[in-house]
Amino acid sequence: MSDTFLQQRQATYKTTPQDLQAIMSAVMNEDIAEELPITPGYSNEVHLLKTSKGKELIVRIDQHNVIGFGQEAWAMQRAKSLGVSVPHIYDVRQFEIVGELKNIMVMQKVEGRPLSEMQSFEPAHFQHVCEQLGAILSKLQSQTVEGFGRPKANNEWEFGNWQDYLAATLQQREKDVPYLVQAGLTQIEAAQMLAI
């Protein structure tokens, strides 16, 4: 993913410091002391905030109303029940930002460094990390579900089969074509990317 594409996509985000404070006040009843740098998200506007009480929280805002954070919270809760370490989720809700309702998630910042930021590993450390990842993936893969897409409140799923899920996902991804073209791809190249 090119930096230009992400920069253009994120330039459309209009969340103000006042919006972030309103979220913190509503969810945590705390003030923001500092906003810390964080790797930007793709579909989400992501903020790392330090509160006046010293908590470090991640605020994610779905600017494109594509991702239901409820399903992510559900998956994280299921992962936690399997013994996988996941961040605490303080709230998932809709919140008005610049006159539009947006899906938001406020969650605990997990200690440590993202694997993507690790430049190199000693062979023994790399093997240890891979073994830890394998153990986590094994736990996650042990979880069974009865469908595809978003889980509904009644334990049913949005799609009963994989083909219907893929078709719906492709329709949703077509909304990204203008951003891909702005980033320098031709219409044909953008269409080819979506077909993958």
Image (cartoon, rainbow, N blue to C red):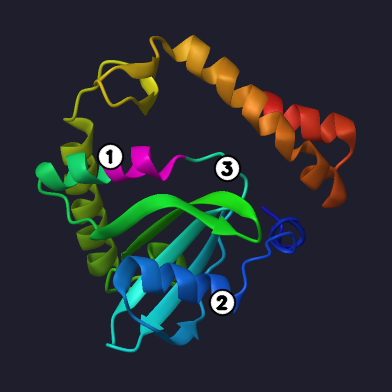
Q: Position of residue 64 (x, y in %)?
A: 62, 45
Q: Are marks 1 and 2 in contact (CB under 8 Å)?
A: no
Q: Amino acid at mark 2?
A: Gln
Q: Which residues are magenta?
A: 68-74
Q: Tell me which label, 2 or 3, sits earlier in the chain.
A: 2
Q: Nearer the viewer, mark 2 or mark 3?
A: 2
Location of mark 3 (residue) = 65
C-alpha span from label 2 to label 3:
21 Å
Residue 38 in sight from this viewpoint:
no
Mark carried by residue 18: 2
Residue 109's quadrant in the figure?
Answer: bottom left
- Say which of 64 and 18 sits in front: 18
Task: Judge left or right: residue 129 versus residue 48.
Answer: left
Q: Nearer the viewer, mark 3 or mark 1?
A: 3
Location of mark 1 (residue) = 75
Q: Secondary structure at mark 3?
A: loop
Residue occupying image coordinates x 47% and y 71%: 22
Queried whether the magenta region covers residue 171, the answer comes back as no
Residue occupying image coordinates x 78% and y 28%: 191
Mark carried by residue 116: none
Q: Amino acid at mark 3?
A: Asn
Q: Nearer the viewer, mark 1 or mark 2?
A: 2
Type of secondary structure dominating the magenta stretch: helix
C-alpha span from label 1 to label 2:
31 Å
Q: Residues within 10 Å of mark 3 (few under 14, many from 20)?
A: some
Q: Residues within 10 Å of mark 2 (few under 14, many from 20)?
A: few
